[in-house]
Image: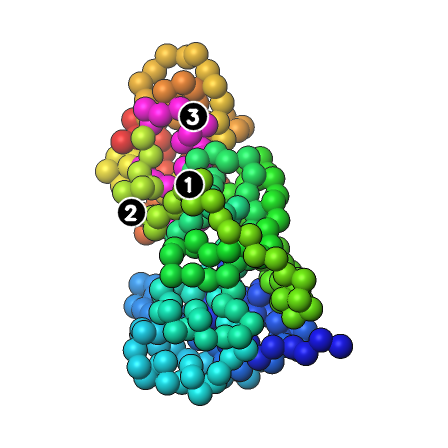
Amino acid sequence: MIDKPKILFMGTPEFAVPSLELLVANAYPVAGVVTQPDRPKGRGKALAPPPVKVCAEKHGLAIIQPERVRDESFLAMFRAIAPDMVVLVAFGQILPREIIDFPQRGCLNVHPSLLPKYRGAAPMNWTLIRGEVKTGVTIMLMSEGVDAGDILLQEETPVRPHETCDDLHDRLAKTGAEMLLKTITIIMDGTARRIPQDHTLATFAPRLKKEDGLIDWGKDAVEIVNLIRGLSSQPGAYTFLEGKKLRVLQAAAEESQGVGIPGEVGAAAPKGLPVRSKNGIVYLQDVQLESKKRMPVGEFLRGYKVAPGTVLK
């Protein structure tokens, strides 16, 4: 029977929770959980714990929340824990070389893309925004470069039609957790093989900026819908309706040769509220007006009249 390594888990958002849950369920010795500090959230700006902290508390795991993992105060705790393996899943800070090099069994990272494509902070978003038809999860050994380490395991999956980032997130989080267990097994039994990445093929998925979500109705309908899919439900693609910010969280594209100016709204149809684009129609299906809740567009239109001919900006 292969010994199980003593693991220090580093992760923060919901994406990391299935990996931690599966390690606990399979009785891996998790010596500690490192996650980002509690942050203000919501209208009241009350401090809220990250999802990984909530999960760790449920299982009675030791929790560390350093402002900076490079600080000597954290590094001293890290040395005291002396993990055999570090597992990092969407942690949110750059690791210093000491943490990367210390664990005898490696410093592993679960990354939701087919590396070297989509290195960076927002791989799932950009996969959908750019209309990719396939994606996957890569388990790699950490290096000092951004998502540039050697690959240990990689699995490909098709991007499903109409899949939003929320859908893809949940699917790849589960896949990543299952792959993590496989990777730990092959490391411990000595069958793991390191595959260097071809850095000439690297593409990047930078952190999203607020302005990335503004819909340009002068673009192709499919391109607009890909943006909406890639940003749904957070942070959400958006447009402006009579000066008010309208988040568009689900939509469908239809090519059409009809006339009209980009952003012009038509009469509501069973497929949604039609909006003219460069080469067709975007049907708005789920929306959220500023300071209101998300709702299907039919429900929205019962409370907010949008006359045909209105132009979204």
Q: Pointer 2: residues within 10 angstroms few (<14), some, or many (20+)?
A: few
Q: Amino acid at mark 3?
A: Ala
**Residue at the location (43% across, 19% down)?**
280
Residue 246 appears anywhere in the view: no
Residue 166 lies in magenta, yes or no? no
Residue 221 — which label? 3
Q: Pointer 1: residues within 10 angstroms few (<14), some, or many (20+)?
A: few
Q: Amino acid at mark 2?
A: Lys
Residue 200 — which label? 1
Residue 210 — which label? 2
Q: Element under label 1? A: helix
- Contact between marks 3 and 2 (CB within 8 A): the answer is no
Residue 221 lies in magenta, yes or no? yes
Q: Position of residue 257 (x, y in %)?
A: 43, 12
Q: Which residues are magenta?
A: 217-239
From the viewer's perspective, is the residue at label 1 or at label 3 nearer? 1
